[in-house]
Amino acid sequence: MQFRIDAGHLKISTFLDEVNIPFSANYYRDVEAGRKYLSIDAAVELHDHLGIDAASKVSFDYFWHYFRDLLPADVHEMLFGKGVEVTDLSSRLELREHDSKILRRALSLSRYEREFIVTEEVIAAFEAQFELLPLMTYLYMVDSASVAEIQLVCQQIGLAYDQSTEAFLNLVSKERATPDAPFVRHAPTLRMPRSVDALKLKDQFLRHEVDRSLLKPEKSEYFDVSGSFKYSSMVTLKDAEIEQIQDRLVDLFSVIEVHNKSGRQLEDSGAQPYFFGLIVSGRPEYDGRAARAGKKAEE
């Protein structure tokens, strides 16, 4: 991925137009995304097809990253070292900033190339059946779901599985050959468009999740999968500090989703559905300085 982006190809499709790889484009995408791993012979073959000089730093980085995905961290460091030798803080910060840019661009493009943008027809369906939203999120967490699985989910959340439910699921899944066929999501990522109706739906969903969370007992001062954010705190931040927080959040999610290959589904060991929202925004109505200035003027 780093080699591709450094070569000037932000999209995998344009990169594959100019290189000769020893397997299909879809398989390459799975390898780069961490969904599949190459054998050592296949890794060497891909290395040679990419035209990487075996004596170059790029070649070292290629195999350094390849074995890091396969070996325990301590074994990998013992065999290959840390990869990049830096001795001072400024060099470490420069290296982290370089990696952050690559990971951010990779995260953005990965989502862009593998996403299903919700249609206006789907958004309109929620106006009468907002309670069906969990079915859509469930389907996009598991890739595909049988009719029996959907019926079980409906039972767990108190919904009836009927013709209207099935018709809605058909809107957010690929076309099925028979009524008994499983529902299959369109793409790994589901995205809401920035239309007026879509933003209203997102706000409605946020209010719904907040109400549910506030009914739970607080279990921790920090984020807890079974707790709530009932006891939140408010801080005052300058614009530059807000930007810094947003940058660090993007870096964090980039590392989680791209570097650590965390595209989990519900059937994966240890995976669980978790709705998480973090809003960093200014709230001028909580700033009482204007009122204080007015009071001083009267005095």
Image: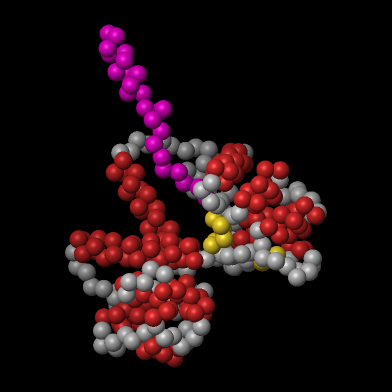
- Which quadrant holds the C terminus? top left
Is 205 positioned to the left or the right of 66 in the image?
A: right
Is 212 positioned to the left or the right of 236 in the image?
A: right
Q: Is residue 296 above or below residue 243?
A: above
Residue 295 lies in the magenta-colored region: yes
Location of residue 139 in the rendering, given as x and y in whole percent from the top left corner = 65, 60
Residue at left offset 59%, top offset 55%: 118
Residue 196 lies in the magenta-colored region: no
Start and end of the magenta stretch? Answer: 276-299
Residue 13 visible, this angle: yes
Is 289 positioned to the left or the right of 159 in the image?
A: left
Residue at left offset 49%, top offset 37%: 231
Location of residue 102 in the rendering, given as x and y in whole percent from the top left corner = 35, 66
Rendered image quadrant of residue 12: bottom left
- Which quadrant holds the N terminus? bottom left
Extreme top residue here?
A: 299
Location of residue 179 in the rendering, given as x and y in whole percent from the top left corner = 79, 65
Q: Nearer the viewer, residue 221 or 230?
A: 230
